[in-house]
Image (cartoon, rainbow, N blue to C red):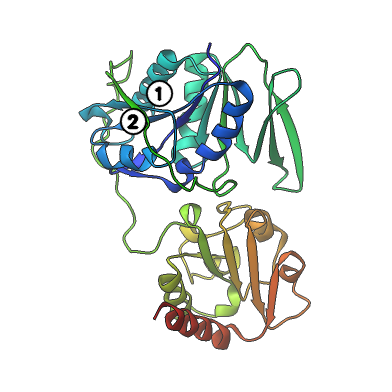
């Protein structure tokens, strides 16, 4: 085992996921302590643009596992490919982003490589005795626990998106290619197509900015003011459970304990009172802006900025101001 840190650089259609680029910062910090290198691993078919994007983060080495069978994400094939990269690098620590793909892939790779695993991590350090120590939220962010890995065992951690910033820049990484050899059972399942929901608005779990609406929007048609603001901010549109249950938005956009947990850099809550279930799904946001006519709404206790006003007046005004600033 080396002291290197391996980063799984998740990509889709030759575009690296932003959360994967954010992994380089903690990887560099860990490598500075262990005395190792930062190695990025890309898996897919055509990876030229993705490799160029990763190279700009300043990693020491890039490994590409490329094959036509890896063009579309397959849990078992990507498991074998990433395990191949791990066997080649023999890293001490492997980092993945806690995206849909990362959450699916990390435990599979941990089992295959007999590694220790921690998920949804928000802090990583090397303790005084040389062991990896990570901090992860529990009870929907109301508490944190520490997980300490054995020093002599491979450690795998999935890191919560938007916990770290992406590096400013770098270049000169060495590149290497590894052949993909299907493992037992890899060809039992063939992914023919990955169908994505229609529309240009992002999914709430993958957006840096989210504009969410509650039951106060009163109808599906009124949500258009949120979509207009989201379009200007390159944001996703979310909704509370009450709004989804009322049919204003599909449940795929629901944020909360029974919906999706999100950690954007900016969360704008429009007409959302702040039920415990909703707060559990978005309390990890970096900056929270709440707009509500009820100044006693629970959402204001969590918000960094509060606007006591009518969303039907504030949101269009915000949209107009963003348009003005964009020229």
- Looking at the rendered structure, which numbered label has been put on residue 237? none
Position of 105 with respect to 142 (left or right) is left
- Looking at the image, residue 97 lies above or below residue 315: above
Q: Residue furthest bottom?
A: 313
Compute the Cα span from label 2 to label 1.
Answer: 8 Å
**Residue 232, how many percent across, how many down?**
42, 73
Task: Determine whether the residue tagged by mark 2 lies in a helix, strand or loop.
Answer: strand
The quarter of the displayed image where residue 180 is located: top left
Which residue occupies 48% across, 75% down?
226
Mark 1 crowd level (few <14, some 14–19, many ≥20, 10 Å Cα):
many
The quarter of the displayed image where residue 212 is located: bottom right
**Residue 91, how many percent across, how many down?**
51, 18
Mark 2 crowd level (few <14, some 14–19, many ≥20, 10 Å Cα):
many
Residue assigned mark 1:
82
Position of 227 with respect to 197 (left or right) is right
**Residue 22, how many percent across, how many down?**
51, 43
In depth, the one of 42 and 229 nearer the eye is 42
**Residue 94, how many percent across, how many down?**
52, 26
Mark 2 in CB contact with mark 1 (< 8 angstroms): yes
- Looking at the image, residue 253 lies above or below residue 111: below
Residue assigned mark 2:
43
């Amino acid at each position: 085992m080396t002291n290197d840190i391996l980063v799984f650089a998740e990509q889709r259609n030759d575009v690296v996921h932003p959360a994967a680029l954010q992994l380089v910062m903690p990887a560099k910090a860990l490598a500075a302590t262990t005395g190792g290198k930062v190695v990025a691993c890309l898996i897919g078919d055509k990876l030229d643009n993705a490799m160029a994007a990763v190279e700009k983060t300043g990693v020491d080495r890039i490994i590409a596992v490329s094959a036509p069978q890896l063009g579309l994400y397959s849990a078992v094939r990507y498991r074998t490919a990433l395990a191949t990269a791990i066997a080649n690098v023999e890293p001490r620590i492997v980092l993945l982003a806690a995206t849909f793909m990362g959450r699916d892939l990390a435990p599979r790779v941990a089992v295959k490589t007999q590694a220790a695993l921690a998920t949804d991590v928000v802090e990583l350090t090397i303790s005084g005795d040389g062991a990896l120590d990570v901090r992860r939220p529990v009870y929907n962010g109301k508490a944190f626990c520490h997980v300490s890995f054995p020093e002599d065992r491979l450690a795998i951690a999935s890191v919560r998106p938007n916990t770290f910033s992406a590096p400013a820049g770098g270049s000169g990484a060495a590149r290497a290619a590894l052949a993909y050899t299907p493992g037992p059972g890899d060809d039992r399942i063939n992914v023919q197509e990955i169908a994505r929901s229609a529309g240009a608005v992002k999914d709430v779990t993958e957006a840096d900015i989210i504009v969410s609406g509650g039951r106060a929007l009163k109808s599906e048609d009124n949500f258009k003011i949120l979509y207009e603001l989201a379009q200007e901010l390159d944001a996703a549109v979310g909704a509370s459970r009450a709004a989804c249950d009322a049919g204003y938005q599909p449940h795929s956009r629901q944020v909360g304990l029974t919906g999706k947990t999100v950690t954007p850099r900016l969360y704008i809550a429009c007409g959302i009172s702040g039920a415990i279930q909703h707060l559990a799904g978005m309390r990890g946001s970096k900056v929270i802006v709440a707009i509500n006519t009820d100044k006693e709404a629970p959402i204001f206790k969590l918000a960094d900025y509060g606007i006591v006003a009518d969303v039907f007046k504030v949101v269009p005004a915000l949209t107009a101001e963003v348009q003005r600033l964009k020229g």
